[in-house]
Image (cartoon, coloured by chain):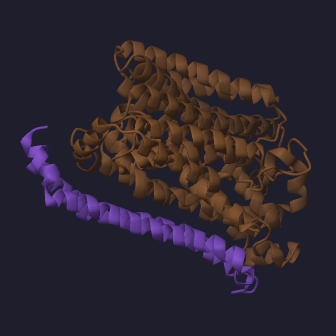
Amino acid sequence: MQTSLGTPTAAAVVFFLVIVALTLAVTYWAARRTRSTREFYAAGRSISPLQNGLALAGDYMSAASFLGIAGLVALRGYDGMIYATGWLVGWPALMFLIAEPLRNLGKFTFADVVAFRLRQAPVRIASAFGAILTLIFYVLAQMVGAGNLVRLMFGVSYEWAVVSVGVVMLAYVLFGGMLATTWVQIIKAILLLFGVSLLTVLLLWRFHFSPGALYASVAAQYGQAALEPGGLVSDPVDAISLGLALMLGLLGLPHILMRFYTVPDARAARGSVLYATGFIAYFYLIIPLAGFGAAALVGRDLIRSIDAGGNMAAPLLAELLGGTPFLGFIAAVAFATILAVVAGLTLAGASALSHDIFTQAIRKGHASEQEQIRVARAATVAFGSVAVALGILFKGQNVAFMVGLAFAVACSANFPPLLLSIVWRRFTTAGAVCSILSGAILSVTLILLSPTVWVDLLHYPAALFPLRNPAIVSMPVSFLCGIVASLLTREPDAEVRFDDEKLRTYLGIGAE
Amino acid sequence: MNPTRRALLDSVEFQHLVANRWRVSLALSVLLFVLYYGYIILIAANRALLSRRIGEVTTLGIPLGAAVIVGAWLLTAVYVIWANRYYDAEAARLRARAGDG
């Protein structure tokens, strides 16, 4: 087939402009409702469970999972499906372990919960360190992905792509705060779910609505092996370690956790997880079909010739089934996806810098509303600029492992102290700081020494750490450090407050 | 802390509610772990089983993968139904006793 990928078609440009105009209009509307910190960080806690469910799904369904999993299934068959399941299973765990206490105890960030009854300054600074480390790895992968994707789809230069993502995204966050960011996520989630659904319907139509016929076509071209587990789970320890990072890393992603403060109460937080899980489950159920469809109809050779990683499988399938207009739509949706995810990450980064470090750690909670908003906006510009600079700096680098790194740091540095602070009375300041630092340092170090970086990127003959995914080591170590350091120190005040605040944790009495 | 809240905190009903909440969420978490890691370990341990054909070419692995995703969503739904029906009613009753809501 002939493809118009890489040349900006009229359809792509029109869809792209419509989406940008719509989201900027929403930002204008939101800007007039964003004056206090409560509005800037938490959209005035006015978001409904359905809206927040869509926004959570929008925050989570990144271009990496949309394009990446479709590509993985197209090129490697069933293995891509195994990977897709891992992306969903964190959501029920988030519901069972974290969501409601998080909502009841916190105000704007997950550090509010960790620091709740402990000494503010050390815990805030350590938590902000863990949060920003996670967000930097995550945003770096998004930015490099954005540069490549926009270049592949619209033919503009990498640097221009990265800068334009940065500028548009900053407009959302800077002026519209959480309210605009939430609506950008909602718009993006609806467009993405609609686009992928339409793609699947058009695909199945070709096969008379029989997935069996689709699989038969894949098997006829690439052999039965495409429908069987391949090499992904060849090392069970590594597979379980990856599963742990994907599942429990979600429980430590600052931009996801922050969304729970946008709803009025714990019951609404619960409802939003159920909606989000439903949308995300639906997404990961149908994305593999698009991947198999691309393999069957577009062909693996063509997919690989355009992008070796397979990222263009879904857009190519869209072009084949719906022509240039549909390709333009999918390209614009992919771009909106990156904008929305980067906006969410930037808002979370800004809140760690301004709310946790400036307001709570430096000013001990005493700063006027105007001053807090000013610092929050400055932090937004700072985080956004760093994201753009890193995106340009890492041009041409293979950063696919960075998302894995972000999840590994999240589940090793952010999740253990958060869970311990919710469930364990004896948890202390020293425990929190040790848990965060050990998890962060160990997960980053082990990834540097793993085959992914040590062998594949740095070209040393043998890795110093055998696993590609460090979570199975770094997360238990973080828990252990948190527990041991807590047992070696005592904070009687914190224990008394833990008991007293149970009414807030479990009944929501006095919750923000 | 005022005496009504202290009494509520020390009440059997409140402690019962908190214990129940963790019992339910831990039980569901265990089911989730068995569902997901069971699937991963099954792939690692018995690849032939997942490669078994259940249709013309469709392998058993395909519906199993989909079942993990649907099952995870169902577990979430079970928790939400339990919490909306039992937990919220009980929590509202206890809140009223504390003179709050």
Q: Residue at x 52, y 50 (%)?
A: A480
Between A370 and A444, the residue placed more toward the observer is A444
Indicate left or right for A176 with A370 as reference.
right
The answer to which image quadrant residue A421 occupies is top left
Q: In the displayed structure, would residue B96 be above or below residue B60?
A: above
The answer to which image quadrant residue A472 occupies is bottom right
The reply to whether residue A363 is in sight is yes
x, y percentage for residue A76?
80, 64
Between A460 and A77, the residue placed more toward the observer is A460
x, y percentage for residue A419?
43, 49
Q: Quadrant of the C terminus of chain A?
A: top left
Between A43 and A320, the residue placed more toward the observer is A43
Q: Residue at x 65, y 45 (%)?
A: A443
Q: Residue at x 83, y 37 (%)?
A: A397
Indicate left or right for A170 with B97 as reference.
right
The reply to whether residue A456 is in sight is no
Q: Quadrant of the N terminus of chain A?
A: bottom right
Q: In the displayed structure, would residue A102 be above or below residue B38?
A: above
Which one of the lettered chains is coloured purple?
A: B
Which one of the lettered chains is coloured brown?
A: A
x, y percentage for residue A190?
53, 48
Q: Residue at x 69, y 75 (%)?
A: B43
x, y percentage for residue A160?
77, 25
Between B72 and A211, the residue placed more toward the observer is B72
